[in-house]
Image: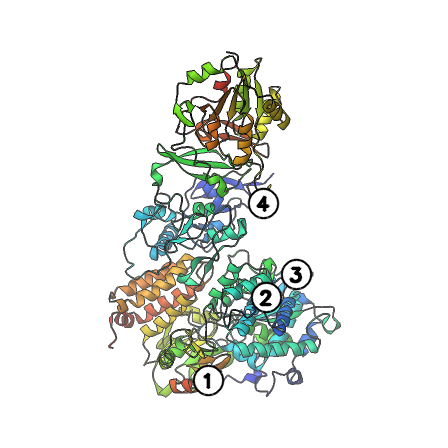
Amino acid sequence: MKDSANYKDYALLSYHHIPGVHNLEIFERAGGYETMKACFDKDPEAIKEEVKQSGLRGRGGAGFSTGVKWGFFTKDRSAIKYLLCNADESEPGTFKDRYLVEKNPHILIEGMIISAWALGTQKGYIYIRGEFYHQAMILEKAIKEAYANGYLGKNILGKGFDFDLYVHRGAGAYICGEETGMISSLEGKKGQPKLKPPFPAIKGYRGLPTMVNNVESLAAIPWIMKFGANAYKQWGTEKSPGTKLFSISGDVNKPGVIEVPLSTTLKEIIEVHCGGVRNGNKLKAVIPGGSSAPIFNAEDSLIVKMDYEDVAAKGSMLGSGAIIVLDETRNMGEVLKWTLEFYHHESCGQCTPCREGTGWMEKILKRKEIGVAKKSDIELLDKTAASMRGQTICALADAAAMPTQGMIKVFRNELEQYVTTVAKK
Amino acid sequence: MSKLEKIEFTAENLARYKEYLTRYDDIESALLPTLHLAQEQFGWLPDHIVKYLAELMGIPEIHIKEVISFYDMLYDTPVGRNIVHVCTNITCSMFGGREIYQGLLKHYETDFLTPTRDGRISIQKMECLGACEIAPCMRLNNDFLGNVDLQTAIHKIDELP
Amino acid sequence: MTEKVKFKWNGKEIEADKGSNLLKAALDNGIEVAHYCYHAGLSVAGVCRMCMVEQDGVPRPFPACNASCGEGIVVRNDTPKIKSSIEATLSFHLLNHPLDCPVCDQAGECGLQDYYMKHGQYDSQMVDKKVHKDKVQDIGRNVMLDAERCILCSRCTRFTEEVTKTHELGILNRGDHAEITVNEKLKNNYAQNLVDICPVGALTSKDFRFKQRVWFLEEVQTTCIGCETGCSVKVSENKNGAFRVKPSYDHEVNGHWMCDDGRNIYKHVSGALRLFGAQENLNGLFVPVDEFKTHQLAKGKTLKFILSTGLTNQEYEKFFEKIKGKSAQVALYVLPNQGEDFDGLLTRGDKNPNLRGARKAFEDAGYDSSQNALDKLLSSVSSNDAIFVVVPEIIYNEDHFNTLISKVEKAGLKIALTHGETLSTLRAFDFLLPIPTFVEKNGDIINFQNKKRALRSGISYGETSKDVSYYAGWVNL
């Protein structure tokens, strides 16, 4: 099998092999910021169009077309509006954005400046999760360098365009990765998602138009603008073009972040890029898109192609591209328990079905601890999960319900056994 | 901290706070960075610090309390000088994150977030820290520590000031 | 003029303002829609998820409270899909709720109880431990908080944030550990509204707590006489007395709210102090007497009346009609201002409920309602006079009123027209004669905006058949 992870040929990690590329000087020597400079001579609308043509889809998880999203944004360049980079990266299993920015913060900054020019935003914030302290410092330093070079601030490169960029640290709340939760958090509130409509592109941060894009989406912009939409589409499928970062963890020999074309098979990712299942163990299951994504059994895992459509066709979602590999030694009841504890802990608490449902699902799965478990609890769990879906302001309830229902679908027998088996002390 | 000590930002932190204000188009948006800053100086965020910040920023106290209570990394109870985060999410739990967490609580004879008797550390069970490739992972203050076992963890924690 | 649109809700055609709130339009048109977090006087939170609807051509259900009325839209909340989702959401609401209805004051007017009777399938699938929170907390201003009963609809926190802007309440923590918390005890004069807007029994009134089951009460729709604002209110009462006052939505005057001062205006209505007939002062002790005796004593005296500003327009009118062409002196006692002129919300310093109505009636009858006229009347008081003082129902500044009483001392016959023996200084009077309270008479008053608002009578708690005009009939006997 061919190793398709030759990063130098790809879009996002193409600078990663260069030592010290987090320094602006080295980044520039390798061709960084050239695209940005060229973009200032381009019509903003043309940039938006190019991004739309590239088919780039939001890499945070939802997979919505970045170009189309940009199309919802006001074209009034004088209106006050914001560009918000989602670097909250808190979907369990995901660590690609951290990997991207800690080695190469400038690719993100370059992408944000180009995006700001295209969108006409005067201010931008990189909302990075609180746990990524050093990564925030790396970004701060890189931003300082960009200011020093006149790439940020007033009248950038004499083009009459102003763009200020700041790092904003979160403080430990999964829900701030949801774009309106992030906006609430940036506004100095609890990070609770906001009702939609209105959508952030219309009324976002401080009630003003706000474009929220994921780190990986924004970091792809320089490449797309340099080589063009068509070049980007050489990879992937028609509906899922381009390359994607995958964070792979769990029972593989070489966990980590890779960039591969979308639609690369999961089999290739595991066997070629990650050195196969650890200890030569048998593959049992894979969570393909972060903890919210319904789990695949071994069979589906070995045939699925990692693009938005094929993963969805097989009943899960590509999500953030966080792949958690589980081998034959793993207990699915435990995996579900860890998952449910997480969502229970992270529910923001405003919508009733989520606030109450996430806690209850965890309690149902743990009934054996209070001696009231029965096999039919799995049925109740399934029903409870189903009744949480599509009922809430944001997708957290769905994110808790989907993997629960997915796990029940694939491993029902094992779960029934799990809930009724009391561990020996 | 003694009660007699005046509750206010140091001159240096006040300057940092003022710099934060320049980053945002309203004062409320500077709350989260300001809370990080306050916690850095005061260790945790009890009511009298909240009161100080409320007056400084013109934000209602209850609003600040809500925000503190919402985020896992802001503390409204006393914590140790060093914070130890132990990830207990899926990948880390697969590789013993939970056992490490329980082991640390036992070793240091403490409980979730409760400072050890010497006030040196607080151990906090955390959700996914975003470093699953080095599972099981932890954070010692702001530094990530990966592929740890209980013994290494204790060893590293003991090196903390 | 606002553009109107027509749309269909469960097949029923509704007309509403274009772009107005969809849920409100349905509710205003008598459609029952389960909802806890929505309140027309507050911002939209959209968190209880009970008012979910489906709309033709819209792929996913959405809460009606966050949607607006559009021409021709077709929405339903009676489809099997929505019905089952509402039932599920209701059971989520009940998961950590203690279901202590038998000891809950909200029982009978509880949003949870109402809807679970209707939709509920509370089938004890919940064998798990409930999340425990603080039960009985006195959070100030007569408000009690039971955090376990709370369903986190956030109406109360939105109220203290948006309406009073006093920020006493907040919701701390995340998920099912989220809990209403007081930063400091309630300090605003609108705190009782929190009890009204709480859809469950989490916030109850200490004053009303355990006093009455609501199903034993009747509501009288009337107007508050606590100040010149004239908020529309409902007084809950039964034969044992009045038990509480709640605001009644009045778009022009008070919207959804009323102040806490106004909540107390019922207290004098029933109770031991009420008069059931004429009373005579026997060495400082009032004892029942035949009204005829007072009548006889007044004969031959010059009758002088000092009216209060708390009578209805109709009472003033009838009064002046009775004394028309007769020789009676009349003046008006105006209550002094109390507190700040206006608190920015509803409460006003001018405590006279119907000053405008009184002045107009005086003027129409050719009488002078000014302070000068009152002073003139008072300075001429002599032993030849029978003076009738109408005692205001609510007196904030007793000293001020007592000064008035001291000035009528010289009168040969001193009669207080009052609903009860409300002040010890009334002992300066020779007789107390009964008049009705504001919830025992029908008529209008005119508020600070010159808007007419109605007083309506409910149950009588004293002698209410005679009003000031009846006593005016004694003139020139």
Q: x and y percent of residue A30 in the render? A: 64, 85
Q: Identify the residue at horizontal 57%, vertical 44% (top origin).
A: C343
Position of the C terminus of chain A, as image quadrant, is bottom left
- Of the numbered discs 3 and 1, the one sitting upstream in the chain is 3
- Is the residue marked by circle 4 packed among few (<14), some (14-19), or many (20+) residues within 10 Å? few
| Chain for disc number 3 | A
Name the residue carrying label 1: A273
Name the residue carrying label 3: A80
Name the residue carrying label 4: C344
Q: Identify the residue at horizontal 38%, vertical 84% (top origin).
A: B150
Q: Amino acid at mark 3?
A: Ile
Kind of element beneath mark 3:
loop
Give the Cα separation between the discs numbered 2 and 4: 30 Å
| Chain for disc number 2 | B
| Chain for disc number 4 | C
Question: Mark 1 or mark 2: which is in front?
Answer: 2
Q: How many marks?
A: 4
Give the Cα separation between the discs numbered 1 and 4: 68 Å
Can marks 2 and 3 be said to lie on one chain?
A: no
Q: x and y percent of residue C99 in the render? A: 32, 52
